[in-house]
Amino acid sequence: MSRSAWATHIAVTVAALGAAPTAASAADFDWKRFQGKTVTFLANNNPVAQALLTNKADFEKLTGITLKVDGYQEQQMRQRLVTVMNARSDEVDVFMTLPSREGEQFAAAGWYGDLSAMAKNQAAKEYDFAGLSQALLKAGTFGGKLTSMPMNIEGPILYYRTDILAKCGVEKPATIKDVEAAAQKIKACDAAITPFVSRGLKPAVAYTFSNMLHNMGGSYMANGKSNLCSPRGKEALDTYSRLLRDYGPPGVVNYSFQQISALYRSGRAAMSFESSNELRTVMEGGERLKDTGLMPFPAGEAGLVPTAIGWGMAVSAFSKQQDAAWYFVQWATSPEIQKRMAVQGIAPPRPAVANDPEYRKWIDEQPVRKQWQAALDLLATKGSSEVGYPIVANPESREFIGQAVQDLILKQKTLDQACADADKGLDALIAQK
Amino acid sequence: MVDAANTVTPDRQRVELAALSAPAVLFTLAMIAFPLAYTVWLGFHAFSSTGRQSFTGLGNYSKLIADTEFWHGLWVTLALYLLSLVLQLVLGIWLAMLLFNAKRLPGIVRSLFISPFMMPPVVAGLMWLVILDPSLGAANYILQAAGLPPSDWLASPIWVIPTIALIDTWQWAPYVALIVLGGLQSLPASVYEAAQIDGASAFTTFRRITLPLLLPTIVTAVILRSVDLLRFFDIIYITTQGGPGNASNTLNIYGFRVGFEFFNIGYASALMLTLTVIVFGVVLAFNRLRGAVAW
């Protein structure tokens, strides 16, 4: 072994030891330590939180902590969070967060409690910190501080109708060019079917567009500047908007996951590029179970660079009981609870849970679940969590991406104008401190 | 003989009245004055993307003047306001006349006429989102069944404002009708009898008598709808979130997004205060008009 390899080996071992709870602390762990306390959890009322909260009574029984759940839809949850955090209020102890979207911003604002020490010193023996997806832990680490623990793993994947592809003599697409060729054939073969659908709603576009951009070898930034007008950026903008304009449903500029899943589930779309989280919704009623195939979005010039993100649980920096709050976070992201959530269709951010026999049995029940898990395995290993610009003002950056795509779908600007306008606005955002 | 000790002097009465009404006044001040003052204070501060705040004086307001998105939002707000208001007045007055003249209309039919405004805007928004979906919605199905081309409705930058105005009109024209119906029922019968004796036609009676006498009621309806329409938010947020592009990005939607999605609370406060001033200005103008047309 070379000197540098030895050095790396030692560094990794030390880091792993540092991250794992010490034997003494794990052995001394007492789940009842905060008995009688009340922890307030600001939750996004999505399938992830819903699956978690079916086990709420078990947490309260195990710890003696009362869990007060303050649940809202995603946007309303953020609205409440901004109000609470701007007031530096201790009303919320734990909140759900998307590190890929707001991580930089919340971390810079000092809203996240630092979980590094708690994960190291106050973890139960069975917690298995090292078993969590390292990519997602990294995505939740800002300035060396661990700010959230991953609850799930998700990303956009391609849902396609095997029967329609067969009827129209189309092979399963292997590249982005194949997607467009397939859409063209399907359009000619069956006019009643929408060949391709994905997100067109302005703030939602970045989630799916990022995957295409990365697969094509593009990047959002280069040399500290916005890079949408680079050849790869322009190609991605052009291809994404052309797919939606020429082969998408009418009104696609208002399409987000609800409309996409409804269209695909109703049998009126041949290919749908949408979140892996939508599997349960898409399969509701069972009509799509037998005629759907799933795969990561096909490769571009840079191969497969899928988008992989996950919801995280963070402890508020203003909570007056961060230790008790950490107990809830720890319980909610433990292998046992993530296993229970997994069989409810929430993809686990722990490779070990993904290999658990009970979970594998659930996966093996239906071929579509096997393909879903295979796509998620790829997301976990090759995924990029860059959705929109890797800057503090990430949510605002998504507006510019969405605007450029909509301008092209609606033919309101040329490709050069759309990307130049977006780059101009984005450069101003990047320059903001 | 009057007991002097029990006599309530005007001064004492004033003190008692002040003491009794003080809690309500204080409560009102706390609920209105404090949020308003806090918003004014926020409007004088700049918030960075990371939540750091600093005093900026009129900085947010000078930024607003140079902000093309603000001017676009103002234009969208006014266009939507005027279109919706005109539609709601015309349909509301027509509906009120219909209900007033159809005295034998069963109660259930009357209730159905006025039911849309009792529906929560969120439910109404979601319902119309489904109806107007270009692929799956009933609206295009009906158009196509009638041999007409389908429309993109809320997804078209050209049609989105008229479509939202139509949804709001569907919901709130009955409310205008209810106000106007109240006004119609209070009009003096003698004027109509005189017109009838003079041989005035139905149209002349409406134009020369009903409409002028109804003006104070109509202006009241205009004031109530103006406040709502200028602050229009819920249905737009549910159906388009300001899109497509920024075609339906009203000032209220823009302010909300700046504040709660981009976390710039200071600039959002400046935007919302500007909108508040516009609303107050419109209400004051119509209030004066109401005074002028009172009879």
Image (tube, coloured by chain):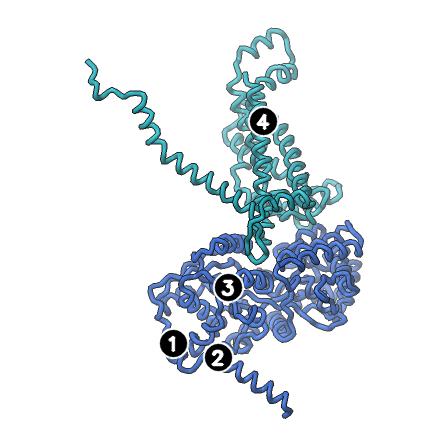
Q: Give residue B223's position: percent from left, percent from top.
A: 56, 29
Number of on-image labels? 4
Residue at the image position 57 percent from the left and 75 percent from the top: A134
Residue at numbered disc 1:
A29
- Chain of the residue where label 3 is placed in the rendered structure: A
Which amino acid does the dot numbered 2 rest on? Ala
Q: CA distance from mark 2 to mark 3?
A: 21 Å
Q: Quadrant of residue A169?
A: bottom right
Q: CA distance from mark 1 to mark 4?
A: 69 Å
Q: Mark 2 and mark 1 in contact (Cβ < 8 Å)?
A: no
**Is disc 3 in the same subunit as disc 1?**
yes
Q: Mark 3 and mark 2 in contact (Cβ < 8 Å)?
A: no
Q: CA distance from mark 3 to mark 1?
A: 24 Å
Which amino acid does the dot numbered 3 rest on? Tyr
Q: Quadrant of residue B198?
A: top right
- Chain of the residue where label 1 is placed in the rendered structure: A
Mark 3 or mark 1: name the one nearer the start of the chain.
1
Q: Quadrant of the C terminus of chain B?
A: top right
Residue at numbered disc 3:
A112
Mark 1 or mark 2: name the one nearer the start of the chain.
2
Chain B appears what colour? cyan
Q: Nearer the viewer, residue B197 or A118?
A: A118
